[in-house]
Every structure is written in structure tokens, then in C-alpha cells.
Image: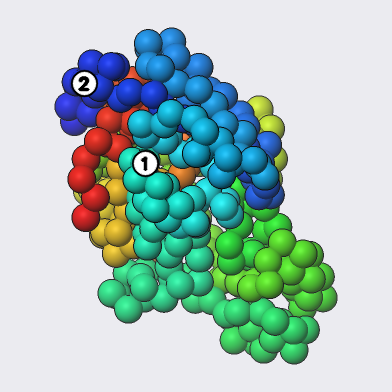
Amino acid sequence: MSGETLKSQLPVAAFGRVAVLFGGTSAEREVSLKSGNAVLHALQSAGVDAFGIDVGDDFLARLVGEKIDRAFIVLHGRGGEDGSMQGLLECAGIPYTGSGILASALAMDKLRTKQVWQSLGLPTPRHAVLASADDCRVAAAQLGFPLIVKPAHEGSSIGMAKVADVDALIAAWRDASQYDSQVLVEQWIHGPEYTVAVLRGQVLPPIGLGTPHSFYDYDAKYLANDTQYRIPCGLDAAKEAELKDLTVRACAAVGTQGWARVDVMQDGAGQFWLLEVNTVPGMTDHSLVPMAARAAGLDFQQLALAILADSLEARG
């Protein structure tokens, strides 16, 4: 795959006036601010007539008052990645980057994403939904330990915890419940983690992840300097092709558009397991999609322009 096929061939004037939407009020606000400012700088440096909007209480007034030809969504989490912003922009007649309403809402809901994958025979770890301490005890008996607890509608590993006994599971459920009324618990997959980005219908080079932390948590993603990123990912050609094919099928099941990133585990037997799909992945200096794009021959500015160019495509 050549990066040349992914680059935008459009003159920057074709984009018109672009609003970069970032910040917001979700638990991922700080990450979104970093991502959004990086995208805004890249677009402005390329000559795009771009300006930033930190999405807050005045957003509707800004939407009406500003001239906006298209929006680059860099809002992570609720209010930006869950279909609500996509619906608002469609009502306003403003083209935007990334996935549409349905795919955005579905991908933000980890439980229902898993249910869709399961219905299609795609591999994803066994799980349970937690709403009480009794649910925790039942899940422990059914799934065994260790387990991973996560809020069903958060990203960036916020509220997640790895647990090894019932008391820790109950404590983690209570902690995750502060972020989300729906809490998911999954079987822990022993083995390496991979993340695979898709850009404009093409799969970027997979990245193998390594961390001394118990899992790839918020600190490992955004703060630590000891996280390992392997590109090439370390798989042989056949296994890498299998991973890429699974990523394409996972994205197709959810209905993603433009760009996305899928997180996958591999167990000791070599079997891949789908964890989740991100429809507005991070764009910070620690983020994975820019890293994969570089391996494919696109620098950050070219990546931002490629994502933006996709907003000119008709939606299905």
C-alpha cells in the first residue's frame, strides 16, 4: 500500500471554511483538546481556512453565527463521538468527517458493538453486564479471573480496571459506575494487543502494543514514555493479513466511514479477539493513527487532509 493513494488530491480551497470541533464536556476533554489543536495547526499550516471551536454551552449559537462549510470532528467520547454531534450537523446541513450517526452511536456502545459482532460470528471476549454486587459475583463464577471492567460508553481507558478477585471486581464496578450507568466486564485475554487503523477504505500498518502496566490504560496511552509501539507489528505475513481482514469485517459490521481504529487482542493459541472500534481516534503526539499513517507514508498534515477530504464524499 502506498501513502500516495491515501493523500488528498484536492486543492485546499475546495474545503471552504472548516470548523475543527474539539474539547467538549466528556471525560475525554483533555485528550480532545490536544487532538483538536494538533489538527487545527496542521490544517492551517496546509493553507486550509480552518478555525477551532471548543464545544460548550454556546455551540448552537456558534453553529448559527459562523460560516461553516464543513466540520472536522475531533471530539472524543460522549457529545461528539456518539452520534449526537453527527445528527446535529446533518440537521444543519454541514458535512463532517468520520462515521455517520448510526455507526458513531453503535461504536460508542461497547456492549451493543460486541452483540453485533457476535451475531455475525466475529470473535470478541465473553462478557457480562454489571448492575449490582450480585451481578459481579455471578460474572466471576461464569467468566473466571482475571477480568477487565470498563464503562460501556467511555473511551481512552477511562474507568477501566483489571481485577483478580470478587472484592476487586465489586470495587471496580462501583468505580466504573461513576462514569456510566452501564458497566461491562470481559474475560481477560492473555497475549499481545494490536491496534489497526482504517483510512478511506484502506487498512494502515497494524501496531503491536507493549506496556509494563497491567494493561494499556490511560497513563500508558497518553502520559508514559515506556509504552512500546511495534511497526512492523511482529506478526508473520499470514497472521497480519488475518488481522487486517478481521479489522475490515469489524468496521463493516459497525458501518464506519472515513477513518476508524480497531483494538484487538491475541491469545496464546494465536486467536484474535475484537475489543472495540473507535470512530474518532486520538490525534495527539502519543496517538496511534498518526503513527500508523507515518508507517504508510503520510505525515500528520497529510493525514489530517486525507480525513478532511473524506467529508466531501457522499454518505451511505
Nearer to us: label 1 or label 2: 1
Circle 1/circle 2 CB separation < 8 Å = no
Which numbered circle lies on residue 94? 1
Q: Is residue 194 above or below residue 38?
A: below
Seen in the image, is 195 located left or right of residue 135? left
Q: Amino acid at mark 2?
A: Leu
Residue 248 is marked as none
Q: Position of residue 28 (x, y in %)?
A: 64, 45
Is disc 2 surrounded by few (<14), some (14 to 19) or many (20+) residues within 10 Å? few
On screen, residue 148 versus residue 203, left or right, reads right
1 or 2: tag closer to the N-terminus: 2
Nearer to the camera, 1 or 104: 104
Q: Which mark is residue 10?
A: 2
Q: On the picture, is 222 further left or further right than 253? A: right
> Which amino acid type is marked by label 1?
Ile
Q: Secondary structure at mark 1?
A: loop
Tell me the residue at 65%/71% (across/down). 183
Residue drawn where x is 61% and y is 29% of the image:
34
Looking at the rendering, which quadrant does residue 312 occupy? top left
| SS for dot 2 | loop
Give the percent coordinates (x, y) of residue 167: 82, 75
For residue 60, which quarter of the picture?
Answer: top right
